[in-house]
Image (cartoon, rainbow, N blue to C red):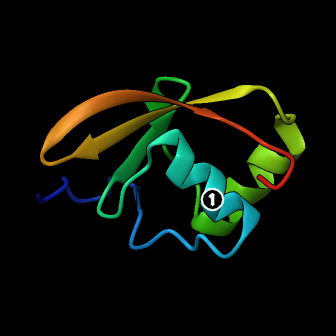
Amino acid sequence: MRLDEGVNALEVRGINTGQVEGKSAKRAGLKKGDIIVGKEKKPLRLTYQQFNIHVKLNYEAGEKLPLTLLRNGKRIQFDWPLTDGD
């Protein structure tokens, strides 16, 4: 799927299940090929590193991070339940 020019997105290219955050992502239902295009129902405007820092600074284990994903060409809302390793 092509995204419009200037749209920021993070593609899930693989899930490292050898790390805690990879295990929680897989358990939560993120899949290889998912494209994260938004959080909290707003367009994503962060790099991968900024996104990780944002999550660590603004969310705690047990909270859910609301994401907007593109999966197989369809836009879906997804709540990622965060764990201690995220």
Work out which quarter of the rendered image holds the N terminus and state it.
Answer: bottom left
> Which class describes the residues within 10 Å of circle 1: few (<14), some (14-19), or many (20+)?
some
Using the image as rendered, state which of residue 2 and residue 81 is in the foreground: 81
Instruction: Note whether residue 43 is visible.
Output: no
Using the image as rendered, state which of residue 44 and residue 77 is in the foreground: 77
Residue at x 78%, y 42% (from the top left corner): 83
Lateral position of residue 43 relative to residue 60, left or right: left
Residue 57 location, x and y as percent?
88, 45
Residue at x 77%, y 52% (from the top left corner): 86
Lateral position of residue 83 relative to residue 6, left or right: right
Q: Circle 1 — which element?
A: helix
Using the image as rendered, state which of residue 50 and residue 12 is in the foreground: 12
Residue at x 44%, y 30% (from the top left corner): 78
Instruction: Note whether residue 35 is visible.
Output: yes
Residue 46 location, x and y as percent?
58, 55
Give the amino acid at mark 1.
Answer: Lys
Residue 25 location, x and y as percent?
57, 52
Residue 33 image-quadrant placement: bottom left
Using the image as rendered, state which of residue 33 and residue 29 is in the foreground: 29
Residue 50 image-quadrant placement: bottom right
Residue at x 68%, y 68% (from the top left corner): 49
* Image vertical order of residue 53 relative to residue 38, above or below: below
* Image vertical order of residue 39 relative to residue 45, above or below: above
Residue 65 location, x and y as percent?
64, 31
* Image vertical order of residue 73 relative to residue 8, above or below: above
Lateral position of residue 49 relative to residue 9, left or right: right
Which residue is labeled 1 in the image? 23
